[in-house]
Amino acid sequence: MFPRKKMTALTAIAAAGALGLVLSGCSPDAGNQNGKVQLTLSTFGNFGYTDKLIEQFEAEHPNIDVTHNIAADGEAARSNLFTKLAAGSGLSDVEAIEINWTTELRQYADKFHPVPGEDIAEYGDWVDFQKKPVTTEDGELFAYGVAIGPSAICYRGDLLEAAGLPSAPDEVAALLKGNWKHYFEVGQKFAAGSKDAKWFDSAESIYDATIQQMANPYEKEDGTLIAASNPEVEKAFRETLAVAPELSAGFDQWTDDWYTGMASGDFATMMCPSWMLGLIEGAAPDVKNWNVANVFPNGGGNAGGSYLTVPKQTKHPEEAAQLASWLTAAPQQIEAFKVAGPFPGRVQAFDSPKLPEVTSEYFNGAPTGEIFTERTQAIKDFAFKGPRHAQITAAASSAISRVQSGNQTTDESWKQFVQEIESLK
Amino acid sequence: MSILQERTQQNKKKRSRAARWDVKYSPYIFILPFFILFALVGLFPLAYTAWVSLNEWSLLGGQGDFAGLDNFTSVLNERDFWIALRNTLSIFVIQVVPQLIIATVIAAALDRNLRNATFWRMAVLLPYVMMPVAVALIFSNMFGDRYGLVNNVLGTFGLSPVAWHNDVLASHVAIATMVNFRWTGYAALILLAGMQAIPRDYYEAATIDGAGAFRQFFSITLPQLKPTAIFVVITATIGGLQIFDEALLYDLAGTGGPDKEWLTLTLYLYNLGWRDLDFGRASAVAWLLFLIIVVIGLLNLFISSRISSSQGKRK
């Protein structure tokens, strides 16, 4: 048997544990310690919501305490969100989502509290392409727009110079102004003068950017699947892959190699949605020659975007809505843009004198606030994304990767892509 | 008096009945907790998955129309399913053979009279403690196509780089390496336990007969190790057919490669359920995987019983 002393120690531990259980059992259920409403906020990656920003909210709303949870990456956040939505419990009071998930979530918009009319009355509207993906058939919004991804071109000044091209931002913008064909032609000039570096990072990112500029690349609003039969899609696919051997550094996007390529100077230009700036800076902190040009092939394009939602599961819908509205209001959007790069989606932000003041030290002092405001205004068409958009996008980038690696010819790969699309029906 | 007698009589009867029940039923009560637990977390999910697989079922939308065996036929007609089956078996074979060989060598080394034996045994188990996700992240970086450590090392020896993410076999080798990194130490310890159970008399006799270390290893250790090795193979089979983390995290897209080079069955299942939100078909795959494991398990049993019976004949 236990010696007596040990016995009492054990009992004490057990008792303390039981007491702890009782105490901790109280707090989440009641939802208010010292009379405050406890809210949880879940985001992923870097939304630019610093502790300081959250503290500012708490100072302005003394009755609310906010706990901010950050998931490492979007994929983890996505499976967490979908699993808990299905289970009907366990979600935070405010949950962040990505634009790519909206195609599926739109069918289950009734699982979220709609954005109240007062929000828009007070904080103003969002740009069109931020609003559309989260608008239900009744015209209500089920998510608060956080950020959009207007795209510019990022480039390595030293590599352009080495190939005998101009390297000042204005000159590069003037040089690249035009359509995709023009962008490729300048690339061929670059290739003629460049030693090892290629013109762009990956055929996938070029193809994706052209798709984002079409109104209905893969699906029609009524649900018809047109990805395989759309001549514009096939044209973009073939034209990108035709120039790829000469111009592409051949990376697959999002791989470790791709990130290393940003630092090692394997390519001179890349498609740059506003959030890409942070990724480049993170991947190549010691490179001094990255810059942003206020230009994009074929006008403007949007890539990506993020939102906040208030799930119906929350016990504090009013306070959660306050938090979501406040965080997505123009002044806070501009703050977040300064910190992490997600670009404001509220129209009010563009009128704010603070936005044009934002510059990026890393990108040689580029006036990023100004550049991306103009890039946003240049966006005309933006892709409609139906429920199968994510799967088709994945199939397309696999198809391009198969050709880039030399495992298949363009024809073979396109054929397999078409087959995969057929099986989605 | 008579009343008292009757009562003791009755008490005796009761007691003997209780004792009989005790003998008869209490063993069942003792093993009951396991079966309750098994029914709750094993049998029920299994049955429920079977029910889900017979319906159209969306992760968010819940149950749809009854579909009969449609989910099964559609999965079996899918190219991805067969490729996933091929990959799973191929990765399993590439993984389990080197694992057994290396683990046996490590176990033989640990079986010698080492100083600080416990330290070395613990050290072998260290990779097993690491999170599979962490292992997958580090190894994926090492197996980068252009800037990975492995290809850099190959380059310094003048060898051409391997397309780890575009070649079927190369990607299987990379994933099998990750799995082996974690599991070889574990297998080595089990084999070590098996080796230490071998009577030392055999070795003494062999030494007197003049057999060297190698001869002893091949003629005594290996044959005596057979039952343990079979156990290791069976556990490795079950684990090998469920390779998931390593394949999911081998690239960032998690779709199993541009041409599904390293799509495993569990990854295929996960993508159907959580990416396509199609729980009906995901459940069908789960049941097919279950059947495959049962078949391979029976095959294992058949082969291992033949091995042990043939051993008996030789004696």
Image (tube, coloured by chain):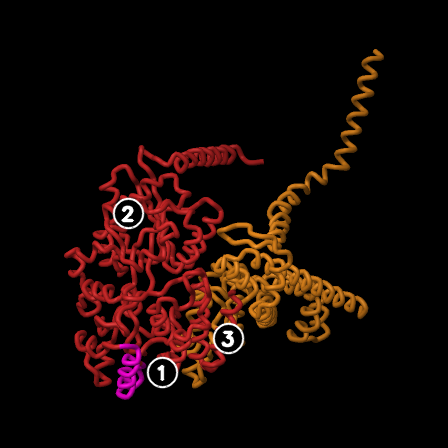
Chain colours: A red, B orange
Q: Are marks 3 and 1 in contact (CB under 8 Å)?
A: no
Give the SS element for disc 3: helix
Give the SS element for disc 1: helix
Q: Chain of mark 2?
A: A
Q: Residue A56 got which mark?
A: none
Amino acid under disc 3? Gln
Percent position of residue A144, x then y? 32, 51
Label 2 packing within 10 angstroms: few (<14), some (14-19), many (20+): many
| Residue at 42% in and 82% down | B155
Percent position of residue B44, x then y? 62, 47
Q: Nearer the viewer, residue A170 or A46?
A: A170
Q: Which residue is mark 1?
A: A243
Amino acid under disc 1? Val
Percent position of residue B124, x then y? 52, 63
Q: Quadrant of the N terminus of chain B?
A: top right
| Residue at 57% in and 65% down | B110
- Quarter of the image for residue A199 reads bottom left
Q: Which residue is mark 3?
A: A416
Label 3 packing within 10 angstroms: few (<14), some (14-19), many (20+): some
Q: Chain of mark 1?
A: A
Asked if A203 appears above or below A195 in the picture, the reply is: above
Amino acid under disc 2? Ser
Q: Which residue is mark 2?
A: A325
The magenta segment is A179-198
Q: Is residue A329 left or right of residue A112?
A: left
Q: Quadrant of the C terminus of chain B?
A: bottom right
Give the CA separation, mark 3 to mark 1. 21 Å
- Quarter of the image for residue B202 reads bottom right
Give the CA separation, mark 1 to mark 2. 45 Å
Q: Nearer the viewer, residue B272 or B235?
A: B272
Of the numbered discs 3 and 1, the one sitting upstream in the chain is 1
